[in-house]
Amino acid sequence: MRTFQGQKRLRVYLKNLGMCAMCGRGLQLDSWEADHIIPWSRGGPTEVWNGQALCSSCHALKMTDHPFEIYLPGDIQLREWQKNFCEKFLRFSETQYLLPEGERRAFILNAFPASGKTFAQLACAKYLISTGLCNFFVVVVPTQKLRDDFVSSAEKFGIRLYGKTAMRPNFMVHQGVVLTYQQLSSEANVSAIRLWVSKHDTFISGDEIHHLSDNNSWGENFELAFGEARVRLLTTGTPFRSDNARIPWCK
């Protein structure tokens, strides 16, 4: 067996072997197709932990130019820039997933305020969770109001996120957590988050990342808490700080 992460992926694969991993329909022994979760053309290895069973229809759909759209609810319509971002970010994610922790980089999304960064992040989270590349999504936002809004928006994508001040998510119910940057100022919270991240294949998104810097406690704790995250995204509408302080994972 490869690693602890590989063992988890193998269990998920075996559990889902009797049904299509995308549409959930039952599969017959003579009518299913093996799919690379991380595509072979993008470096995905031909190993059990990187495989899933699909029906022929879903396998054909996944070969289109917009595989992430297959997993979106029918009433979710993305803007053109959001589609372009998702394609680029998800291709980037597939190159980062297998790298050692110290070599993983962050993708930065710079878009105007109110342009739709929340939906763009959730579209990517839906794909990563649905395909099994990640099984835990954490997003950190500046305020409690944005935390509540993010939880509400995630429900439209069929993603259940925990978004309360008390750090008590139910991992049997919630697929991720929404935090505020202020919550990262607590050493106890950071220790809890590090434990969550170590036990899951985590997609971390730092929303409005200009609120972070290594001059404040939560900027330093952000890197500490999410160092083991498999996939890293930073978003902002203001890609710099007036005090020239360093932003985590940015040069």
Image: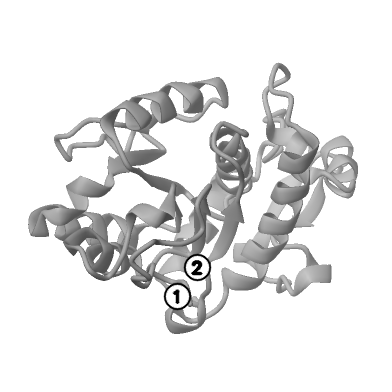
Q: Residue furthest top?
A: 75
Image position of 104 with respect to 77: above or below: below
Disc 1 marks a residue whose amino acid type is Thr
Q: CA distance from mark 2 to mark 1?
A: 5 Å
Q: Residues within 10 Å of mark 2 (few under 14, many from 20)?
A: some
Q: Residue drawn at (70%, 37%), measured in percent from left and top? A: 22
Q: Is residue 180 left or right of residue 25?
A: left
Q: Which residue is mark 2?
A: 6
In what element is the residue under mark 1? loop
Residue 73, position in %: x, y? 67, 23
> Horizontal and vertical percent for residue 215?
23, 69
Q: Which label number is shown at residue 3? A: 1
Q: In the image, what residue type sits under mark 2?
A: Gly
- Tag 2's secondary structure? helix
Front residue of 201 and 208: 208
- Residue at figure coordinates x 31%, y 65% from the top left: 213
Q: Residue at x 48, y 77 (%)?
A: 251
Decide: marks 2, 1 in contact (CB < 8 A)?
yes
